[in-house]
Image (cartoon, helix red, strand yellow):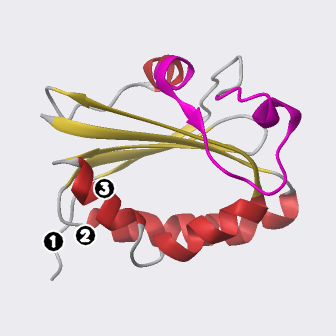
Amino acid sequence: MAFISLTRLRVRSKRYLLPFLWYSLLSARQVQRSPGFLAGKLMLGRKRTYWTVTAWNNEKSMKAFRIAGAHRPAMLKLLDWCDEASIAHWVQDSATLPGPQEAHRRMISAGRTSKVHHPSPRHAAHETAEVSCAIRFEQALSPRTIA
């Protein structure tokens, strides 16, 4: 069994892209060394939209990652940097990550909005994903041990 965590964030302005990408890099490095991490993928969508999907041994491992290291301050900054944020979680038999279309379908069916300080009209209406899910880039993440 694997616990799957899916996130979708939209950076509200180009002025936040560089710091957002920096924290994304730090968080990607952190997740790869996190206990319980099985697999992950970063996806770039349209209009400054970024998706992550990660597989974990259990929800507890994912939550421990979420509140530690570089990811913790990144989450606080995203409240101001993003105008859309949504998450979805589920348990499945394997750690196989969903592709873009399945991730989009899951976000529509099981996703919920997260708090942001400057919500877009779509976010304020609790719409959890854009109508079209065009992924322009994917980067796989694999577990790494601390050397």
Q: Position of residue 48 (x, y in %)?
A: 75, 45
* Residue that badge 1 annotates: 145
Q: Say whether disc 2 or disc 1 marks the residue closer to the N-terminus.
A: 2
Q: Which class describes the residues within 10 Å of circle 3: few (<14), some (14-19), or many (20+)?
A: many
Q: Residue visible at 39% across and 75% down? A: 68
Mark 2 and mark 3 residues within 8 Å of each other at the beta carbon: no
Front position in the image: 141 or 53: 53
Q: Residue 71: within the magenta?
A: no
Q: Which class describes the residues within 10 Å of circle 1: few (<14), some (14-19), or many (20+)?
A: few
How far is disc 2 from disc 1 in space, using C-alphas?
Answer: 6 Å
How far is disc 2 from disc 3 in space, using C-alphas?
Answer: 12 Å
Q: Say whether disc 2 or disc 3 marks the residue closer to the N-terminus.
A: 2
Image: 122 above or below 40 = above
Mark 3 residue type: Met
Q: Which residues are magenta?
A: 106-128
Mark 3 and mark 1 residues within 8 Å of each other at the beta carbon: no
Q: Position of residue 32 (x, y in %)?
A: 29, 63
